[in-house]
Image (cartoon, rainbow, N blue to C red):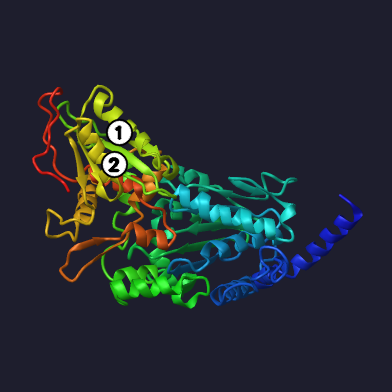
Amino acid sequence: MTKSAVDTDKQLAAHLRSCYHDPLRFVLTMYSWREPGPLAHHDGPDMWQREFLEALGAAVRARGFDGETPVAPIRAAVSSGHGIGKSTLQAWLVDWIMATRPFAKGTVTANTSTQLQTKTWAAIQYWTKLCLCGHWFVVNSERMFHPAYKESWFCQAQTCREENSEAFAGQHAANSSSFYINDEDSAVPERIHEVEEGGLTDGEPFQFLFGNPTRNTGSFYEACFGARRDRYLVRVVDGRDSKFTNKDLIQEWVNDYGEDSDFVRVRVRGLPPSAGDAQFIPASLVYAAQKRHAHPLDDEPLVAGVDVSGGGSAWTVCRFRRGLDGRSIPAIRLTGEQTRDRNMVIAKLAEVLRTGVNGVPIAAMFVDSAFGSPIVERLHVLGFTNVHEVNFGGQSPDRHDANQRAYQWRKMKDWLERGAIDRDDRRLEGDLSAPGFHLDRQDRLVLESKESMQKRGAASPDDGDALSLTFAQPVNIVRDHDDPYVPKSTWG
């Protein structure tokens, strides 16, 4: 390192001492706002972010940690609508703590591994590169650390599965700060919160909870709105008050669902649902199905569901289910780009229909008609009579559901109470708990559409829709493997 670089680092260190009690000062001075580069058109934090950082700094000053005597944990929680800049704030917090508190130890988690890697941790990687002291640290896909103190001055990304709770234990920094950041905390298991408490017992500890309030129970709800709200610095942020959100989309949601609907309460206003859970399938139900063992009977039919992509970021997915077993047979997935070659899709499906899976024939295959209609037609020409189109927007067989797709997802949710899915299938795990829902004026279930989910930044639930298609219609038990059952109804 040159003398000039050493002098610069000394100046940075001196400046960072003044930021110890002032995270807002850190953010305003350690990123190159309004200077040439990625931040050329940005002048700093949004108003709600500034207010959060100011309140955090006041809490630090009030405790007056002397480097030895433990102080009360600093707990903060942000409940909000979508797209307000939570991931960005989380990255700033990591950079601030790591830069101002030598030998700090932190853990960052999120509701799913996809959220953790592609949004939460990706934001930390991005902003640390922009930070003026970012070169002090190494940041890889799982860990941020000081190269001279890799095991004692670090922040790590950890999945929040209950089985992984021990990874959150034993995190102590008696002479510095132990900190936890939970993203989309409504779906983080209670066990993780319990273990995190053990890391808040010494030094100057922090716990930060962020999320959409999809549940009106649990630790996140209690921290923001319930019995433990007095322990936290709480901010409830309406998406309309953030400069980053899509105001036209928000108004569209308000027009479609109503200002007081649970959908708008949760996804715009940052308020918990008035009743029930705005997340149609709770993560707890998904986790339970991942742990469960299910063994199909010999005569149970093997059913396939195919969600066909229109291209782009969506995938074409074929999923299989045999009774309570949705785990044993891996899904077939084709990217949006691969799906542009319809002949490839037809060839893949025809092979499965012709040979079956593991010696078991396909009793029925249900295909979403939106982009799958030509594929079904071609498969019929090839002689496969057990392939059926399903119109997601068509009339539901049950009056309690607004359309066919809502019917299928409700049936799938009921099945998850007893069924089994692959515990390592992160795409399916995320898809199942992603859509929201509301009830229409006739008290019918309306599942959040793919289009609405994509507009708010959620991934298209291709795997979830594919599995739901296996519930499109009851399929009888297989009496003769040489003569697959053909459902009586036709689908158009």
Q: Quadrant of residue 382?
A: top left
Question: Quick check: marks 2 and 1 in contact, CB under 8 Å?
Answer: yes
The answer, for residue 331, to whether it is visible in the render is no
Label annotation for residue 72: none
Q: Is residue 80 above or below residue 107?
A: below
Q: Is residue 70 above or below residue 315?
A: below
Q: Report the mark closest to the observer, 2 or 1.
A: 1
- Residue beneath the point at 57% across and 74% down: 46
Furthest toward the right, the residue is 3
**Residue tagged 2:** 306
Helix, strand or loop status at disc 1:
helix
Helix, strand or loop status at disc 2:
strand
Query: Along the line of sight, which residue is nearer the eye, 325 or 191?
Result: 325
Label annotation for residue 349: 1
The answer, for residue 241, to whether it is visible in the render is yes
Q: Amino acid at mark 2?
A: Val
Cα separation, mark 2 vs mark 1, equals 9 Å
Q: Amino acid at mark 1?
A: Leu
Q: Is residue 7 left or right of residue 393?
A: right
